[in-house]
Image: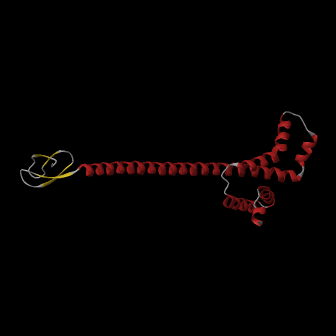
Amino acid sequence: MFLNIILTLPLILILMYFSRILGIVFLIVYFIIKKPRTLTVPKCILLVGILLYLPKIVVDICNSINYKIAPLSELTELPIFSNISSYALFLIILGLIIYIIQFIWLQITGNVFNFLHNYIQDQEKESAKLAMKNDLEMKEKREKAKNSRVVNCPYCGADNLIYNNVGTCKFCRKKITYQEKN
């Protein structure tokens, strides 16, 4: 319960503001325990970083076109804002790195999962085909066994198993026929 409270993204971002190394450790623990399967975490980190850095971007754009927004310029000149802007750049870089790593990881695991899934399906299809073939062969053998007859060869006297009314003696290779006894 305590770990679930601490391992929330807003608390990790606040912790990362005060101690970046500790925040990164908690972020790694978050990824290990929560195992997010989507790219929402790096997107949220990027969004927070961009939102925190947005006043600096607006002031820089306004300065480039010789336009000044007084309250925003005063805000960006505060000493705390330099900490916030460096933190925002850190979040943007961290978000991009996590996004790239997680995207690659999701692609690799997705491809491996698809490969294994297709391999298992192919193996199941092959075993089903083999079972069907074996069943058909067994059915044919049963049908042959129903229609088989033991006939004595009139030429050499050997016992032969024939499946129709006409067959060939296995020993003397002469034609033999089955004749029903009345």
Residue closest to the eye, 38 or 52:
38
**130 displayed left or right of 118:** left
Q: What quarter of the picture does the N terminus occupy?
A: bottom right
Q: Residue at x 38, y 50 (%)?
A: 130
Position of residue 11 measured from the top left corner of the image (x, y, whole percent): 80, 58
Is the image coloured rainbow, by chain, by secondary structure, or in one colour?
Answer: secondary structure
The quarter of the displayed image where residue 165 is located: top left
Residue closest to the eye, 104 or 110:
110
Position of residue 82 measured from the top left corner of the image (x, y, whole percent): 84, 51
Q: Residue furthest top?
A: 65
Residue closest to the eye, 7 or 113:
113
**21 displayed left or right of 171:** right
Q: Residue furthest front?
A: 182
Residue closest to the eye, 51 or 84:
51
Q: Residue at x 6, y 53 (%)?
A: 156
**134 displayed left or right of 15:** left
Report the number of discs. 0
Q: Residue furthest bottom?
A: 2
Position of residue 125 measured from the top left corner of the image (x, y, whole percent): 44, 48
Q: Residue furthest right?
A: 70
Position of residue 64 measured from the top left corner of the image (x, y, whole percent): 83, 35
